[in-house]
Amino acid sequence: MSLLIYLDGAYVPKEKALISVYDHGYLYGDGVFEGIRAYGGRIFKLTEHLERLYEGAHHIMLSIPINPEEMAAATLETMRRNKLNDAYIRIVVSRGPGDLGLDPRKCSRATVVIIADKISLFPQEYYEQGLAVITAATRQRSSDTMEPRIKSLNYLNNILVKLEATHAGVMEAIMLNSQGYVVEGSGSNVFIVNNKGELITPPAFLGILEGITRNTVIALAGAEGIPVREGIFTRHDLYTARECFLTGTAAEIIPVISIDRRSVGAGIPGPLTRKLMDRFHDYIRREGAPVYPHQ
Ligand code: PMP
């Protein structure tokens, strides 16, 4: 049976889930999206993801034709229609079909798509052995251009970063902003543990996507009594970190063991990283909006 996709209120087979080439999401990257995970029949942090989606839409003055409650219901229903328990869910809201000009007023109704499928970002061995990464030459865009806090359909900057990683023979790259401060990965947030045992991640205002996994990790670390703070740091702090890891909905928590060929700590996933990975895995099994009754 073909996967069923939510498209503007209907559940249609994947092959028939088609949108107009005049949609400004396609023509201009005009829209917002979310990547969400479901574990064991529960959608993880659904409310937080929808909050970010609607905030991004508000910023770009994109009116989403259904409200957050209806979006949540449609997301749960997409899971049920596909009989899924574990899934990667992609919600895409684009400006909708318009004409060939930029003017969003020509787009009368936003297009809403919900896909519930699978994703595997990094092979399992990297979660055990850790990841080698580079710092990218491509810098983060500044907040006075395309605000990085909006999860917009405009991911070209991130794709350039990913290309750099691929060309360097590694799976991920870390971006700096124009001032040289560490911001985030191509599709992940970054944490380091410094020589005082503090867990540090860049603050949202520096120009990052304020990751939901990031915020979960901050809360879990706090609950464990691990000193954690948002702070600005440079490549030197990355190179001299005791531990480093990346977080994201698709990536979850993945250890980093080398950066620009400098080993991080002992060159193996550190104890704090492993502890947080364990806590995170416990937590995702407990938390989340149940897809099926009695879950
Ligand atoms: N930064 C960027 C640029 C991303 O695309 C993502 C993935 N959505 C993240 C960070 C991590 O965010 P989250 O934990 O909400 O998935």
Image: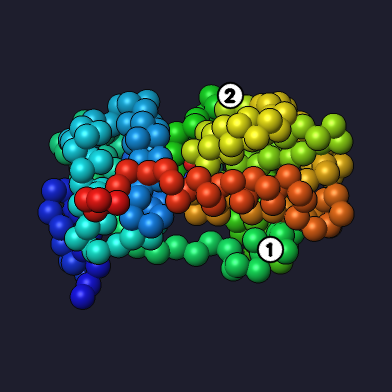
Q: Nearer the viewer, residue 100 or 135?
A: 135
- The residue at the point 45 percent across, 34 percent down is 150
Q: Earlier in the sequence, mark 2 or mark 1?
A: 1
Q: Residue furthest bottom?
A: 1
Quarter holding the N terminus is: bottom left
Q: Nearer the viewer, residue 102 or 293?
A: 293
User: Crowding at label 2, few (<14), some or many (≥20) Cα neighbours within 10 Å?
Assistant: few
* Residue located beneath label 1 in the image: 128
Query: Is 22 situated above or below 150?
Result: below
The quarter of the picture where residue 289 lies is: top left
Real-space Cα separation, disc 2 to disc 1, in angstroms: 32 Å
- Would you say residue 151 is visible in this rendering? yes
Which tag is nearer the camera, tag 2 or tag 1?
Answer: 1
User: Crowding at label 1, few (<14), some or many (≥20) Cα neighbours within 10 Å?
Assistant: few
Query: Is 156 situated above or below 196?
Result: below
Query: Is 110 situated above or below 144?
Result: below
Decide if residue 25 is on the left or right side of residue 69. right
Q: Whole-percent x and y of residue 204? A: 57, 27
* Residue located beneath label 2 in the image: 205
Q: Whole-percent x and y of residue 276? A: 64, 45
Decide if residue 126 is on the left or right side of residue 280. right
Q: Residue furthest left?
A: 10
Q: Whole-percent x and y of residue 121? A: 53, 62
